[in-house]
Amino acid sequence: MLQSLVYMSSATAPFDEEALAAVLDEARARNTEAGLTGLLVHRNGRFMQLLEGPYDAVLSTYERILADDRHGSVQLLAEESIHTRRFPEWSMAYDRAADGSDVPAGFSDFLSDGDRSADASRSRELLRWFRNHPLADPTAANGKHRREA
């Protein structure tokens, strides 16, 4: 059995594209070493991540995230035992500038291209919500940012 966990957090400081690429490199190396896969999504100062892998590795990674001062308002959204990985490779999605530069290893087009998976699990639905719903944007509640559906 494997463990799956989904959390959402707010960045305590702004992340530009360079900082996000550094997070991608660091997390990809660390998660691969721990036997973890999943998807990390960043949008407008907010993170949502699905982690999956051995129970102890998932929990210790989540505990490290709770202690990481780059994350604020961490909320556990879902946790379950699973038989197979939903994301067999670890990747990260964030809004990249379309400047023609090389796509970094581990980058996911989840935000721009969507998700064609038939998986209707709670974890996958949370990721879809994060990608699509304006309330996933922390500035939406203030009326500062409105996104048309």
Image (tube, grey):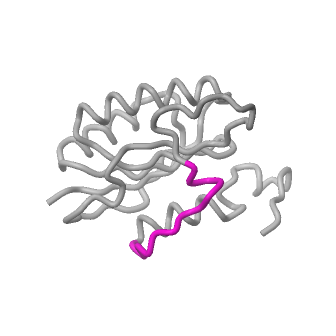
Query: Would residue 135 appear left or right of 128 to someone viewing this image?
Result: right
Query: Residue drawn 85% across and 50% down?
Result: 144
Magenta includes 114?
yes
| Magenta residue span | 109-121
Query: Residue drawn 32% across and 46% down?
Result: 37
Pick the front one: 61 or 113: 113
Type of secondary structure dominating the magenta stretch: loop
Q: How many marks?
A: 0
Residue 96 on image: x %, y %: 67, 38
Q: Quadrant of the C terminus?
A: bottom right
Query: Residue drawn 83% across and 52% down?
Result: 145
Query: Would residue 108 appear left or right of 68 to someone viewing this image?
Result: right
Magenta includes 120?
yes
Residue 127 on image: x %, y %: 51, 60
Residue 135 on image: x %, y %: 69, 61
Query: Would residue 24 appear left or right of 19 to someone viewing this image?
Result: left
